[in-house]
Amino acid sequence: MNSLLMSALCAVVMLSGCATNEVTGKSELRLMSPAEEQRLGEQQYSPMRQQAGGDYVADPGLQAYVSRVGQSLAVFAERELAYEFVVVNDSSWNAWALPGGKIALNRGLLLAMEDEAELAAVLAHEIVHADAGHSANQMSKAQLGGLGIEILGALIDAPGTRQAAQQLGQISFAAVQAKFGRDDELEADHFGMRYMVSAGYDPQGAVRLQERFLQKFGAGSSNNLFASHPPSAERVERNRATAAQWAEGGRVGRDEYQAATKRLRITQAAYEHYDQGREALTNEAANEALIQANRAIKIEGREALFYELKAQALLALDRKAEALKEANLAVKLNPDFHRHYLVRARIHRAMGRADRAEDDYRQAQQRLPTAEASEFLGEALIDSDPVKARALLTQARDLGGDLGDKAQAELDLITLMETPASLVQVRVTGAGDVQLVTLINHAKVPVRHVRLAPADGGPLLRVRGTFDPGEHALTELPQGTLALAKHWQVVSADGVSLR
Ligand SMILES: [Zn+2]
């Protein structure tokens, strides 16, 4: 919608959500209040970081440095948001901003930059996305078009997860990584450079950075590594023109940047080994994964992810005790990352220690709900707390993946306890002595101890045998038994656990 039409609409209809954008000065429709933006940002910042590989903790000095540069720019933002900046542990070139000023930068992107002015360009660009409400507006627009649920529900590597994401109140990575419109990108570049200049930085940093992105990804590239901020020749040109407004000069901060990212540069090869090791693990080449993990650890001994990879490789090689030692190290080095607990839980399971696995799954689940932990924790509660078990198993089923069917089977166990007739039915066909009696098991588990009752009252009938999912002719019933009544109902049936 163009801005003129928007202003007219706002003036005539007097929509309550119309407001002047503090950054651009344009009139626009706003469906998210500042309080909502803040709440959403605060609620999602942590799970989003968990999905993005966790925080980079091997060099706390680098986190502090990025945060300092970010805050020095944020003071020039138009809206006073609770800005936060964090480096997440991912090798790809990307950065994102949640509504409310919660910003993250990938470790890999830091290696793509050469000086503090370039870092300032990225951070200022993200600040504008939050400050001008781009992130919030994008979600609102999507909701207006009825697409909100889809976008919010599309968790990255789990298709069909709409309900789950809604239940968990999680915003997907895909939603935040979704492409901003061309206008939003140009706006973020333009006003970001203003904030840079206000903070004393050389705006040429933004030009150099865009040139590098364009060189790496190409114009109109569909490379999804940088999908949220597609580079273009237009952006380079516009940044050049914007920078020309100001006299040359400003802080570049090459030495400071090189010093702050020194450890990252020295250990870059370690992360390459790690990325290769993870790929090897995906391809079930555990020995190769172990070799790569050891190489990575030799270069950078403080990175929890490397010990996690080593633990996974050792577990795949059935070296459980050694795997546990490495998983303990991973948890010790980064106790905030959910995946280290998931990996350790798997090791405990392989060692037959369900109680310890449960503790670790709980730790993982607190940080980021996953199908794996939901399934395990839900299954453990089927008998003692079916209500809670149902909630967890529903979550596991809706998160999909390999565990979806298992979770559904476990949900059926609960349903069989509560309302057996909804999953197991009996059908009588024929007349007189010639009758066909069929038991239909709709559950995803076998059932046994089935008992039937006539619909209009009378003695119960016990059916012997175990019945797999599907239809079964009941041939062992005494002939004529079911002629006593036309309609029968299943009053109880035990599900057979897959355990
Ligand atoms: Zn952007």
Image (cartoon, grey):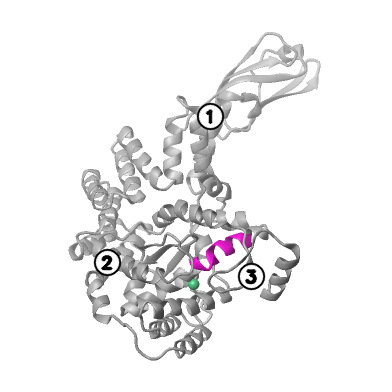
What amino acid type should be assigned to the residue bearing mark 3? Ser
Rendered location of residue 121, percent (x, y): 40, 77
- Mark 2, secondary structure of its residue: helix
- Mark 3, secondary structure of its residue: strand
Q: Which mark is residue 413?
A: 1
Main SS class of the magenta portion in the image = helix
What amino acid type should be assigned to the residue bearing mark 1? Leu
Q: Nearer the viewer, residue 90 or 342?
A: 90
- Check mark 3 vs ligand 1: CB closer than 8 Å? yes or no: no
Q: Nearer the viewer, mark 2 or mark 3?
A: 3
The magenta-colored residue range is 131-142
Does label 2 or label 3 sit earlier along the sequence? Answer: 3
Report the quarter where the N terminus lies. Answer: bottom right
Badge 2 crowding class, 10 Å Cα cut-off, few under 14, some 14 to 19, many 20 or more, is many
Report the quarter where the C terminus lies. Answer: top left
Q: Which residue is mark 2?
A: 62
In the picture, measured across the screen, residue 1 lies left or right of residue 314, that is right
Q: Is residue 135 magenta?
A: yes
As drawn, which residue projects farthest toward the top? 459
Q: Nearer the viewer, mark 1 or mark 2?
A: 2
What amino acid type should be assigned to the residue bearing mark 2? Leu
Q: Nearer the viewer, residue 450 or 94?
A: 94
Q: Which residue is mark 3?
A: 27
Residue 385, compared with residue 23, is above or below; it is: above
Badge 1 crowding class, 10 Å Cα cut-off, few under 14, some 14 to 19, many 20 or more, is many
Q: Nearer the viewer, mark 1 or mark 3?
A: 3
Q: Using the rendered image of the protein, determine whether residue 403 is visible from the camera's viewpoint.
A: yes
- Check mark 2 vs ligand 1: CB closer than 8 Å? yes or no: no
